[in-house]
């Protein structure tokens, strides 16, 4: 069913919620699992009125971006209203802390279960695979390619990465920036790219249904986000064995405690320090190319491990719901 809703709050959400409630009442699922804020609100409303257990995974709360903007205050208010509806699955410690301390999600209605990654699909590339991927995407064979994946949006802050890359490119003629994704900041980004004279050293791919080959083309993965839940793109890059440069922000900090061999951090919104982090990462790669990132991804973030935890939660919620139904 296509509910025909957008990310923003609008009047169409009301009939969409009614259609969703009708679907839930007709199909009677054991559990409703909602991802992101809009689905989280609609799904929890439908689950409440239909008497069905709900799991909600926010994947980074909107309110984590700015505590004073009116839209942030509005979304935080909505999250607080629904805080006790359903069971919240947070994907990182920072996100879980925000849920408890700012949104007042009760600890007994909260679990921390990280996102999982398909380690069979996302694997390190040998030289033929790397050259093949670069040819496929029109990337230079001999360049040092820094890549990122994500929406061109406020959250991902691609302009800071671009400014950092511009500083790096002044001293390194071999670096190239590749980006998988699109978004509302494309016009602003492209205008700045042109001003910097870097169009010939940048390639954007709007969409790939299966992005594993994109990681094969890279030498380094960078993410300049202002906040995250727990980035699936970073997990994919880890499983692909890539070195990482990440901003020191909520959601990314969980990666800092894993003992990753080739992880460099930088504060958010600062092109100068991010450029230095990229420079440091490149030097580190040239001294020691092999990372332990895939090993850690397989040990801590495999789909089997993470999905098993979700399945256990489903079964527990269903069993508890059945007990309540019998006792009532």
Image: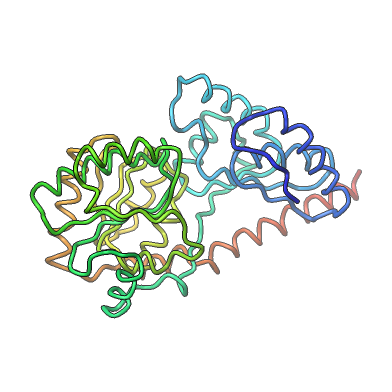
285 displayed left or right of 1: left
Q: How many numbered callouts?
A: 0
Give whichever of 234, 93 is nearer the camera. 234
Give whichever of 229, 279 is nearer the camera. 279
Q: Is residue 62 above or below residue 162?
A: above
Give whichever of 165, 297 is nearer the camera. 165
Locate residue 293: give its quadrant: bottom left
Locate residue 211: give its quadrant: bottom left
Residue 257's x, y, as percent? 33, 53
**Residue in the picture at 49% in, 34% down:** 98
Residue 157's x, y, as percent? 35, 39
Give whichever of 93, 278 is nearer the camera. 278
Residue 144's x, y, as percent? 19, 62
**Residue in the picture at 65% in, 42% down:** 109
The chosen color scheme is: rainbow
Q: Is residue 313 above or below residue 239?
A: above
Q: Is residue 240 above or below residue 314?
A: below
50 displayed left or right of 90: right
Residue 270's x, y, as percent? 24, 35
**Residue in the picture at 76% in, 51% down:** 1
Query: Most extreme residue toward the left, as rendered?
Result: 171
312 displayed left or right of 171: right
Quarter of the image for the C terminus: give it.
Answer: top right
């Amino acid at each position: 069913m296509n509910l025909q809703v957008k990310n923003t709050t609008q009047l169409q959400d009301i009939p969409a919620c009614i259609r969703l409630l009708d679907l839930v009442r007709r199909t009677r699922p054991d559990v409703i699992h909602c991802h992101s804020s809009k689905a989280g609100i609609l799904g929890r409303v439908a689950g409440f009125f239909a008497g069905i257990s709900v799991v909600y995974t926010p994947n980074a709360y909107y309110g984590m971006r700015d505590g004073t903007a009116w839209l942030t205050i509005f979304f935080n208010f909505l999250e607080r209203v629904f805080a006790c509806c359903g069971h919240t699955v947070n994907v990182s410690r920072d996100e879980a802390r925000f849920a408890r301390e700012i949104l007042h999600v009760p600890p007994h209605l909260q679990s921390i279960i990280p996102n999982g990654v398909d380690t069979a699909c996302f694997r390190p590339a040998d030289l033929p695979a790397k050259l093949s991927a670069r040819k496929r995407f029109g990337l230079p064979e001999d360049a040092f390619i820094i890549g990122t994946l994500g929406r061109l949006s406020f959250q991902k802050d691609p302009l800071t990465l671009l400014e950092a890359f511009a500083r790096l490119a002044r001293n390194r003629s071999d670096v190239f920036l590749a980006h998988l994704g699109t978004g509302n900041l494309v016009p602003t980004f492209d205008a700045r790219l042109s001003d910097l004279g870097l169009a010939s050293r940048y390639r954007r791919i709007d969409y790939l249904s299966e992005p594993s080959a994109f990681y094969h083309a890279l030498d380094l993965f960078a993410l300049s986000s202002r906040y995250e839940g727990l980035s699936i793109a970073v997990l994919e890059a880890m499983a692909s064995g890539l070195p990482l440069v990440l901003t020191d922000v909520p959601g990314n900090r969980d990666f800092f405690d894993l003992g990753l061999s080739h992880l460099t951090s930088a504060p958010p919104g600062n092109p100068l320090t991010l450029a230095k982090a990229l420079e440091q990462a490149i030097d580190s790669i040239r001294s020691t190319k092999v990372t332990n990132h895939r090993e850690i991804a397989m040990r801590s973030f495999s789909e089997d491990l993470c999905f098993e935890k979700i399945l256990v939660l489903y079964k527990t919620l269903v069993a508890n719901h059945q007990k309540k139904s019998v006792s009532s």
